Amino acid sequence: MNKETRKKIATVISIYSILMAFSLLAAAHPTTADPALMRNGRSTVKPIHSVAATVETHPVPNAEDAADDSAIWIDPVDASRSAIIGTDKQGGIAVYDLAGNQIQYLPDGKMNNVDIRTGFLLGGQSVALVAASNRSDDTIALYRVNPSTRMLEDVAARRVKTVMAYGCCMYRSAKTGKFYYFVNDKFGQVEQWQLFDNGKGKVDARRVRRLKLATQVEGCVADDDLGYFYIGEENVGIWKYRAEPSGGRRRTLVDSTGPRGHLAADVEGLTIAYGKNGKGYLIASSQGNNSYVIYRREGRNRYVKTFQIIADNGIDEVGNTDGIDVTTANLGPAFPRGVFIAQDGLNEGANQNFKLVPWHLITGEDQP
């Protein structure tokens, strides 16, 4: 064997060794972002459970990445008249009925996340208070729901400036009865604000707490009864804190992205399905593989299962989801055991919108 032949063989062996090394590395660290696992930007790896939406809302007015988060207002007199409040981060906030029809749109700014709490005393009256993060001026957008019209009415006492507004959620303390608003920015900063009646029938706020995470955050949710605050660090996982202003910085990791967890970055929306006796579910939007991950609400938030929303009932599949929301309340014939709502970042043939899935189709149970 001459020198030139030996050199060619050595080159072939070297290339083969490199290819084998990459193959073993890929097997040890699989990724749902691998093009071989994707189709038109959607994961082809089927999660544990598949469901389909039965209702979708009208698309938001603005194009491209616009729809983001939602909150559910439950009509205390007739639950079938309940409404969905959805944000349009390119220009405003909308209200939809349970059939998906838009009944109000307020071009009040670039609203990113939104949340709602009932029982807020305003001017001596108990109201449903809605808070949203306004990215136009980094303020807290504050509304009450008019129960007769289902329309939003501005109740902000002033422009309350926060960190660079991004994700947000609300918390009502079972311990004190006080109401709070959590807001975060793209740099991991989190602020907690107490919301209160300013004595003139308007809502004001004071900052009571600050937290700092290492990287970008957005989706968050608070458990009013158990007193916890959950936040998604998009490329890391879900963190659990105490929700009271005195809760400090101590935290636990609920779940992580990557091969050791059940999440695929980005971790986006978070919501809680309240059950009886402190039970129920914590749910996360796993945007990296277009799925939703369910955990137990109680204890150490044990993983339950993962599901996806497929195309059926004349409604397209759901992908690239930002915000989510859920209720286990009976909302009438269309959603007798509650509803799960997901923003659809890939709404086919139209601007983005929100998809509604009967909650019992996800749990497979009559009650959580």
Image (cartoon, rainbow, N blue to C red):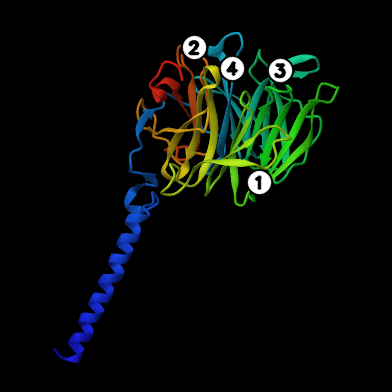
At 37% across and 44% down in the image, what residue appears? 43
Residue 170 shown left or right of residue 21 in the figure: right
First in sequence: mark 2 vs mark 3: 3
At 54% across and 37% down in the image, what residue appears? 269
For the residues labelled 2 and 3, the Cα–Cα distance comes to: 22 Å
First in sequence: mark 3 vs mark 4: 4
Determine the secondary structure under disc 3: strand
Mark nearest the camera among 2 and 1 is 1
Observer-nearest residue: 162 or 233?
233
First in sequence: mark 1 vs mark 4: 4
Return the residue at label 4.
74
For the residues labelled 1 and 4, the Cα–Cα distance comes to: 29 Å
Looking at the rendering, in which quadrant would you find the N terminus?
A: bottom left
First in sequence: mark 2 vs mark 1: 1
Task: Please state which amino acid type lies under the numbered disc 2.
Answer: Gly
First in sequence: mark 2 vs mark 4: 4
Residue 239 shown left or right of residue 355 in the figure: right
Determine the secondary structure under disc 2: loop
* Res. 55 image quadrant: top left
Return the residue at label 2.
332
Residue 127 has which mark? Answer: 3
Q: Position of residue 188 (x, y in %)?
A: 64, 48
Return the residue at label 1.
185
Q: How crowded is the residue under tag 3: few (<14 C-alpha within 10 Å), some, or many (20+)?
A: some
Residue 249 appears in the figure: yes
Marks 3 and 4 in Cβ contact (< 8 Å): no
Q: Position of residue 22 (x, y in %)?
A: 33, 64
Q: How crowded is the residue under tag 2: few (<14 C-alpha within 10 Å), some, or many (20+)?
A: some
Residue 325 shown left or right of residue 109 in the figure: left
Task: Please state which amino acid type lies under the numbered disc 4.
Answer: Ile
Task: Please state which amino acid type lies under the numbered disc 3.
Answer: Val
Figure check: 199 above or below 318 = above
